[in-house]
Image (cartoon, rainbow, N blue to C red):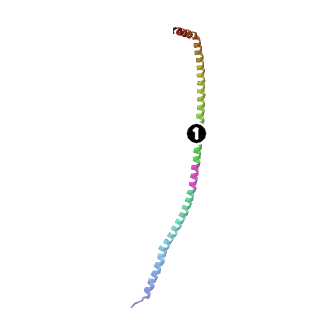
Amino acid sequence: MLDIHLPLMLFVLVLFLTLLVLLNNMLYTPLVKFIDDRKSAIAKDFEASKSVSSNTDELNAKAEENIKIAKNRAAEIRQKAIDDAKVLAASKIETKQKELEKEYESFLQKLDSEKAKLKNELLSQMPLFKESLKAKFSKL
């Protein structure tokens, strides 16, 4: 029937235990160490990504604040330029109006002098007109 050989069983047992010890030292322990290291590296990277994520939120907030400040400054500069242009245009309009008023005054003076001159000429030629009218009425 079944023959049990004790030395062979002991040899297999020793061989099995030796194999377990060798596999534990050469395969399982380094594999478990690698898995633990990998887990810790992943956890560390996850924490770093959280800090970077919060850091990006802060940077985004700062960037938005800088953009808001820049927009306000641009609006101020634009408003100042508009105000300066309005002042410049108003001064040009005022000088042009003064110039036109002076020209108008000189025109009115010239017109008055020509009116007076024409009146004098007409008054000086009035006797001639009267005589020519009398001559025409007498013919009628």
> Where 11 falls versus 51 (above or below)?
below
Q: Main secondary structure of the magenta part?
A: helix
**In the image, residue 34 lies at what x, y percent?**
50, 69
32 or 14: nearer the viewer: 32
> Where 96 falls versus 49 (above or below)?
above
**In the image, residue 63 lies at what x, y percent?**
56, 52
Q: Residue at x 59, y 37 (%)?
A: 84
> Where 19 falls versus 120 (above or below)?
below
**In the image, residue 90 lies at what x, y percent?**
60, 34
The residues colored magenta run: 58-68
79 or 139: nearer the viewer: 139
Magenta-colored stretch includes residue 120? no
Badge 1 marks a residue whose secondary structure is helix
Q: Residue at x 60, y 31 (%)?
A: 94
The crowd level at tag 1 (other Cα within 10 Å; few <14, some 14-19, many 20+) is few
Residue found at the far front of this picture: 140
- Give the quadrant of residue 127: top right
Q: Residue at x 58, y 44 (%)?
A: 75
Residue found at the far left of this picture: 1
- The residue beneath circle 1 is 82
**In the image, residue 61 lies at what x, y percent?**
58, 54
Magenta-colored stretch includes residue 59? yes
Q: Residue at x 58, y 27 (%)?
A: 100
Residue found at the far bottom of this picture: 1
Callout 1, which amino acid?
Ile
Image quarter of the N terminus: bottom left
